[in-house]
């Protein structure tokens, strides 16, 4: 029956282990085939693995995907931004004389086509594809090698979703940009399995199922035992049969033990007359049987002593027993020693012959140095890499030996030269590996230094909410009534208020907001300013950036974003007008009333919770003054929201009552922070 195929996925929990296993780096697994049982290509090299696709930014992409996922998603048991899959590959077609090189190329082309069709079918992206040829097992009854060629694939399931606006029953709703996982339902997974069968085996899934069913029916009619999957019920029945068999064997052993116990009991009772003990003794007890035996032995010894023969008989018996034991021991020792010596000599002779054939002379460091220089010069003359140069030089030596042997001359290159060439190649590979690691470390250090220089120059790094220069923020945190807790896993500081609620998170290059009330935003701006040198950059929604830019202008914090310069200038001008002496009272021109859909309850409550207590009182009063009065009770909050939107849509400044209410809210928050600082003078991590 032909070898089937399938693809099985699991979540990636340890990407470093998966990557090293796929690329066959580090220690080899114990379940690999022996070197003599593996496939070898035309150059004599063992066919272990082949890397068809490998994304150089694999680990950075995995960590970025984890960072963009929520904590709730990370706590899921089977969650991971990457999938690790195993594709079962067909065996080599030895009947048609397929070579190992052609077999390897055929599987590489097959996996390339599989990766393309999988990406088109699912939307996932295949980042790594590695083919393994060195796994399998040895069939115990026949000793036949059963290889297990397969391919490991690493798949990225994440995708970025753009921000969009949808129409709801209450109006427009804006869904922000986020990162999501491309889930595969059962229908899609069935299509993936069918595609795998078609690409790998060359036949459709339906045709293969029909062919397998026909083969099984033919085997059943021929009386052959069925092959296939053993379900859990059959396996449980097999285990129960084995348990019953063990129970029967245990019963037989127990019956044998009982028979021996009965025989011992009978013999002990037969010695009663010889020992002279009462017949009422309990012979089931071991100590009673021992006493009966000892007393019977004493009776026999005394009888022999009376006949003057006991000592002579005992002496001769002891001498005979001793001689017998020594003879047996000597024979056993001689036999064991002879067997050990024979095996040792055979092993030593085989090892000596192998060593003499492989290395007739000892390889010296000078031989390895000459071989290394030969590889380097050969590769340099032909413009090849060191690996290709080694293979080319070895092939040239083999061809030269064969040419000299055909004309009857001695071979110019011995086995010692090939061994020295291999050792030199291994040393060159180790040297290049060390150099690559050193270059990678220098490159990482250079990128980190460039990022720091970019931050010092006042350019905000991408991916944060607030970014800029780096400095200390302990004093400002105390003034704002906050304290932080160090998160060793995420490598960040989590700032909390006096009630223990998380306000924002500070990492090495950014401040990430958790709460969006006015006090939290002011504290975040102050800490970002003192931590990052007095200049900040803002990212996020347009409303958030405008609000934070105006707040930064009121706090005297420099904003480096060029697109927010006009907002900062407008806020500074407004602050300058507010500081001027009050002019003659002017009649405030109210914004025109605009009819619009009512907001959703969530949007309404979000706006209501983010304003202060005085502003919550001022907006309903302004709505009533503007003529927005509803008949139903409880619609005052909607009137206040519509009035606020009238001023925003018309592009007019808010009334003086709203400005005074906001000023009172800021004063209240500042007073509460100062009072909290006096009550809590110090804090720690």
Image (cartoon, rainbow, N blue to C red):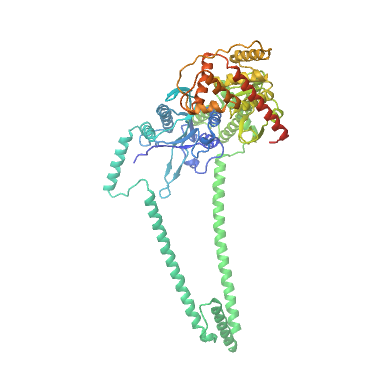
* Closest to the observer, 218 or 350: 218
Q: Is residue 316 above or below residue 411?
A: below
Indicate the quadrant where residue 680 lies: top right
User: Relative to residue 255, is residue 401 drawn left or right?
Assistant: right
Q: Look at the image and tell me in which quarter the N terminus lies.
A: top left
Q: Look at the image and tell me in which quarter the C terminus lies.
A: top right
* Whether residue 311 can be seen here: yes
* Closest to the observer, 418 or 228: 228
Q: Residue at point 49% right, 82% down?
A: 269
Indicate the quadrant where residue 664 lies: top right
User: Where does the image place residue 405, in percent across and percent down from the top left?
Assistant: 49, 31
Indicate the quadrant where residue 423 lies: top right
User: Relative to residue 639, is residue 245 drawn left or right?
Assistant: left
User: Relative to residue 230, is residue 26 drawn left or right?
Assistant: right
Q: Residue at point 43% right, 40% down?
A: 147
Q: Residue at point 29% right, 46% down?
A: 219
* Closest to the observer, 643 or 224: 643
Q: Is residue 30 above or below residue 451?
A: below
Q: Is residue 361 above or below residue 164?
A: below
User: Where does the image place residue 308, in percent across and percent down from the top left?
Assistant: 60, 87
User: Where does the image place residue 300, in percent across and percent down from the top left?
Assistant: 56, 85
């Amino acid at each position: 029956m032909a070898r089937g195929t399938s693809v099985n996925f699991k979540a990636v929990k340890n990407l470093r282990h998966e990557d090293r296993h796929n690329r066959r780096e580090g220690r080899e697994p114990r379940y690999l085939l022996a070197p003599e049982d593996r496939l070898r290509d035309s150059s004599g090299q063992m066919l272990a693995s082949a890397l068809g696709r490998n994304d150089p930014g694999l680990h950075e992409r995995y960590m970025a995907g984890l960072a963009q996922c929520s904590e709730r998603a990370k706590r899921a048991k089977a969650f991971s931004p990457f999938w690790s899959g195993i594709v079962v590959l067909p065996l080599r077609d030895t009947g048609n004389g397929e070579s190992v090189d052609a077999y390897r190329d055929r599987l590489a082309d097959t996996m390339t086509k599989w990766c393309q069709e999988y990406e088109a079918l699912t939307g996932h992206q295949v980042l790594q594809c590695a083919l393994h040829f060195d796994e399998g097992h040895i069939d115990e009854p026949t000793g036949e090698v059963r290889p297990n060629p397969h391919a490991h694939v690493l798949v990225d399931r994440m995708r970025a979703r753009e921000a969009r606006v949808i129409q709801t029953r209450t109006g427009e709703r804006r869904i922000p940009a986020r990162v999501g996982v491309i889930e595969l339902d059962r229908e899609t997974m069935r299509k993936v399995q069918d595609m795998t069968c078609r690409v790998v085996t060359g036949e459709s899934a339906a045709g293969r199922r029909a062919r397998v069913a026909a083969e099984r029916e033919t085997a059943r009619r021929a009386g052959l035992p069925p092959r296939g999957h053993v379900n859990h019920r059959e396996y449980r029945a097999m285990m129960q049969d084995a348990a019953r068999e063990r129970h029967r064997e245990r019963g037989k052993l127990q019956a044998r033990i009982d028979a021996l116990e009965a025989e011992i009991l009978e013999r002990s009772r037969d010695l009663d007359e010889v020992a002279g003990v009462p017949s009422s003794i309990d012979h089931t007890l071991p100590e009673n049987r021992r006493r009966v035996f000892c007393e019977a032995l004493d009776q026999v010894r005394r009888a022999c002593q009376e006949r003057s023969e006991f000592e002579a008989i005992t002496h001769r018996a002891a001498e005979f027993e001793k001689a017998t034991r020594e003879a047996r021991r000597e024979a056993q020792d001689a036999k064991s020693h002879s067997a050990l010596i024979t095996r040792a000599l055979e092993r030593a002779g085989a090892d000596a012959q192998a060593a003499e054939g492989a290395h007739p002379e000892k390889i010296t460091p000078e031989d390895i140095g000459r071989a290394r220089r030969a590889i380097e010069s050969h590769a340099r003359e032909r413009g090849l890499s060191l690996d290709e140069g080694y293979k080319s030089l070895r092939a040239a030596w083999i061809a030269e030996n064969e040419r000299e042997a055909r004309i009857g001359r001695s071979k110019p290159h011995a086995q010692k030269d090939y061994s020295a060439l291999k050792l030199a190649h291994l040393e060159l590979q180790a040297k290049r590996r060390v150099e690559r690691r050193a270059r990678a470390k220098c490159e990482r250090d250079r990128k980190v230094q460039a990022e720091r220089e970019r931050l010092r120059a006042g350019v905000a790094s991408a991916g944060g909410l607030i970014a800029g220069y780096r400095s200390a923020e302990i004093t400002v945190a105390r003034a704002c009534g906050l304290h932080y807790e160090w998160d060793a896993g995420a490598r960040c500081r989590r700032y909390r208020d006096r009630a223990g609620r998380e306000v924002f998170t500070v990492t090495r290059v950014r401040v990430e907001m958790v709460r969006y009330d006015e006090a939290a935003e002011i504290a975040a701006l102050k800490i970002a300013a003192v931590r990052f040198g007095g200049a900040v950059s803002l990212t996020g929604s347009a409303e958030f950036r405008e609000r934070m830019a105006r707040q930064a202008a009121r706090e005297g914090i420099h904003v480096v974003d060029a697109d927010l310069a006009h907002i900062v200038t407008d806020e500074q001008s407004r602050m300058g007008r507010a500081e001027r002496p009050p002019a003659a009272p002017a009649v405030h021109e109210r914004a025109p009333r605009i009819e619009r859909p009512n907001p959703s309850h969530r949007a309404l409550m979000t706006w209501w919770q983010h304003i202060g207590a005085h502003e919550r009182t001022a907006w309903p009063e302004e709505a009533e003054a503007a003529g927005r009065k509803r008949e139903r009770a409880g619609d005052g909050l909607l009137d206040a929201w519509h009035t606020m939107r009238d001023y925003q849509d018309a592009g007019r400044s808010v009334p003086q009552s709203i400005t005074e209410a906001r000023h009172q809210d800021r004063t209240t928050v500042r007073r509460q922070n100062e009072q909290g600082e006096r009550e809590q003078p110090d804090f720690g991590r």
